[in-house]
Each structure stands twice: as C-alpha cells, then as structure tokens.
Amino acid sequence: MATAAFGDSEKLAKVRAAVGADYTPDDDEPYMSERQLNYFRMLLLEWKRSIHTAAETTLQSLQDGPLREADLNDRASSESDWGIELRTRDRQRKLIAKIDAALRRIDGGEYGYCEVTGDPIGIKRLIARPVATMTVEAQEAHERREKISRDD
C-alpha cells in the first residue's frame, strides 16, 4: 500500500501544480479540457490518498491494541465498533477500485462521458461524484431497471 501511495503522491504534486490552487471547472470552458481532466485527476488522487491513510490508521490500531476489556459489555461494544470499522474499510476498498477505474478513464480519454449514452456527464455531477460513469438520467434508468428486476 505504501508503494502505491508514494507513486500517487508524486503524481498528485505534479497535477496540483498543473491545475493551480484556486481552480474549479465550470461550464464556460471546453468540456474535459486538459485542465479539467487534471482537476478531476487531482480530486481522485486526493480521495484515494485519504482512504489509504484511514485504512493504515485502522490497521495500526488493530495491530497495536487487541481487545482486552474486562467488562463483557465493553468488549461486545468494542467488537461491534471494530466490525463497523472493518465493513467501512471494505466499502472503501471497493471505492478505490472505482477511483482507479476513473483514473484509467481519464488516461484513456473516456472520463466525463456516460458509458451508456456517450453524452457528457456534466461538471457539477463529476464534482459531486468524481467516479460517476453515467449521466443522471442514465443512472436513474439503470436504478429503475435494477428495482424492477429485484421485484420480479
């Protein structure tokens, strides 16, 4: 994990320099310009780094302090808390896979475009959810189809 994070840190520093500190994409500039792509690359790399940092903290806590509460209620509460923490880390592991996929789409020139329709996803949606792969409309249609198939 540390090796990947180090390589990402170098990329992040370069991307930050290319983007600029106060830059935020808007609809008045060409869609998915190099600067916009670098902005989203920066968001994704920062998000990934924060997830790695949280995971390392959790791992360190697990290694440092085995549960030794004398009171059974305290121990049960601690075990429950660790279970929640581990489930959170598992969800974040899956999120890292989505972040990596988004970074590959940036490198491949497909980022920002709906995988279903090919239409632009939109700057505001990508700022809110940088790993989005569909427009709001396509996502809603997808979720409706999923709900219908679950109900059958």
Image: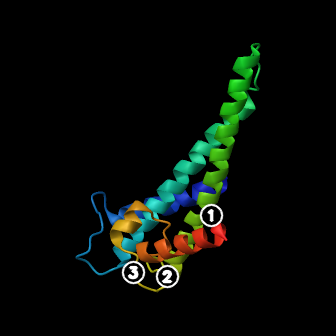
Residue 65 point in image, percent of width and height = 72, 26
Cα distance in 3D space between marks 3 and 1: 22 Å
Query: Which quadrant of the view contains residue 126?
Result: bottom left
Cα distance in 3D space between marks 3 and 2: 10 Å
**Disc 3: CA contacts within 10 A as few (<14), some (14-19) or many (>=20):** some
Q: Nearer the viewer, residue 142 or 127?
A: 142
Residue 120 point in image, percent of width and height = 39, 80
**Local secondary structure at mark 3:** loop
**Local secondary structure at mark 1:** helix
Q: Mark 1 highlights which residue? A: 97
Q: Mark 3 highlights which residue? A: 120
Name the residue furthest bottom. 118
Residue 91 to residue 59: above or below? below
Cα distance in 3D space between marks 2 and 1: 17 Å
Between discs 2 and 1, the one toward the N terminus: 1
Residue at the (64%, 39%) spot, across then down: 85
Residue at the (74%, 22%) spot, across then down: 75
What is the three-letter code of the residue carrying label 3?
Pro
**Local secondary structure at mark 2:** loop
Mark drawn on residue 44 = none
Name the residue furthest left. 28
Mark drawn on residue 110 = 2
What is the three-letter code of the residue carrying label 1?
Ala
